[in-house]
Image (cartoon, grey):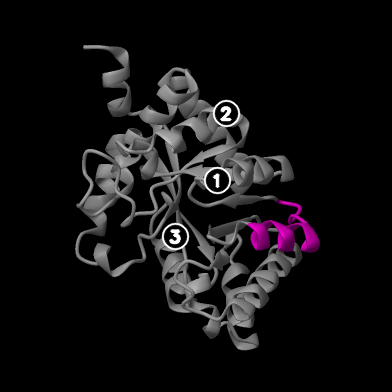
């Protein structure tokens, strides 16, 4: 058996920089999910809020489990719920600096357009301002909105603590522009899909110093588990495929991405 076939299952120390353990899909078995993650080498997880309630839940989980850290924010789908009161409450949550390590998930989604685009842009700008004011990194979602995502980020200025573009985009120019701007790029389950040759080509041309690992659990389940609920224990599958794409060893990939996560999110 080759090293490449073994690589995805080697339990190196990894960080899942974007998952939704606050999602109802995990309500019944979260302790088991965390145990499987730890056994698989996913020793740290950033639980990302997507509205006010899920952000509060992310903070609660971070207080309860040493492996979990929280990010608080409102997803562009729910940007219509982002009021001055919501911003104040998110700021209150983010004041727990022991457990909250980022602002987001924020950004723009012109694919589903579940909130009016002008409302999405207003909420996105407000999240960038929060990240700057609170000196926290930003977690950015972008779908079919790359021009506006980058234009607003340039206009507002990248937060001093940096940002990550969640889920590597399939647009090579956008990926390169985000990296050049100083963003990290999150590599998730789609890089393992059998029809994802273009995505692997894009990832292979990016500097390893700008890459992070993420599952987006319970979504974007990697091959060969597509169709099942995703969870952080599948992170080694993503890490193994990314190591193969970059032509580095699984150990090198684990060291680099864990170091990157530590720098961005100020993890010990």
Query: Residue 161 versus residue 100: which sits nearer the camera?
Result: 161
Residue beneath the point at 20% across and 59% down: 29
Q: Which residue is mark 1?
A: 171
Secondary element under disc 3, as helix, strand or loop, is helix
Q: Nearer the viewer, mark 2 or mark 3?
A: 2
Secondary element at tag 1: loop
Disc 2 packing (10 Å; few <14; some 14–19; many ≥20): few
Q: CA distance from mark 3 to mark 1?
A: 34 Å
Marks 3 and 1, the one that precedes in the sequence:
3
Q: CA distance from mark 2 to mark 1?
A: 12 Å
> In x, y percent, where is residue 208?
58, 29
Q: Quadrant of residue 185?
A: top right
**Would you say residue 158 sits in the magenta stretch?**
yes
Give the number of the disc on residue 62: 3
- Classed neighbour count for the residue bearing mark 3: other residues with Cα under 10 Å, few (<14), some (14–19), many (≥20): many
Gap between marks 2 and 3 measured at Cα: 34 Å
Residue 205 - label: 2
Q: Point out the image quarter for the C terminus.
A: top right
Q: Position of residue 8 (x, y in %)?
A: 31, 28
Q: Which region of the structure is painted magenta?
A: 147-161
Q: Position of residue 16 (x, y in %)?
A: 43, 45
91 vs 109, left or right, is right
């Amino acid at each position: 058996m080759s090293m490449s076939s073994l690589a995805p299952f080697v339990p190196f120390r990894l960080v899942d920089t974007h998952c939704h353990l606050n999602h109802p899909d995990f309500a019944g078995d979260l302790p088991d999910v965390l145990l499987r993650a730890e056994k698989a080498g996913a020793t740290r997880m950033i639980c990302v809020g997507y509205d006010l309630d899920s952000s509060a839940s992310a903070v609660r989980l971070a207080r309860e489990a040493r492996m979990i850290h929280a990010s608080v924010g409102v997803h562009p789908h729910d940007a219509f719920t982002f009021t001055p009161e919501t911003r104040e409450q998110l700021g209150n949550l983010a004041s727990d600096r022991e457990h909250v390590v980022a602002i987001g998930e924020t950004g723009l989604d012109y694919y589903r357009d579940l909130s009016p685009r002008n409302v999405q842009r207003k909420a996105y700008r407000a999240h960038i301002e929060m990240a700057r004011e609170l000196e926290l990194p930003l977690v950015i979602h972008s779908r079919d909105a790359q021009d506006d995502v980058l234009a607003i980020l340039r206009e507002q200025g990248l937060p001093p603590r940096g940002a990550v573009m969640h889920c590597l985009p399939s647009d090579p120019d956008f990926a390169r522009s985000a990296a050049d701007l100083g963003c990290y790029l999150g590599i998730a389950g789609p890089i393992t899909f059998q029809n994802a040759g273009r995505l692997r080509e894009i990832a292979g041309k990016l500097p390893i110093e700008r890459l992070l690992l993420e599952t987006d659990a319970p979504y974007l389940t990697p091959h060969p588990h597509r169709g099942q609920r995703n969870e952080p224990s599948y992170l080694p599958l993503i890490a193994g495929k990314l190591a193969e794409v970059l032509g580095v060893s699984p150990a090198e990939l684990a060291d680099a991405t864990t170091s990157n996560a530590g720098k961005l999110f100020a993890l010990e």
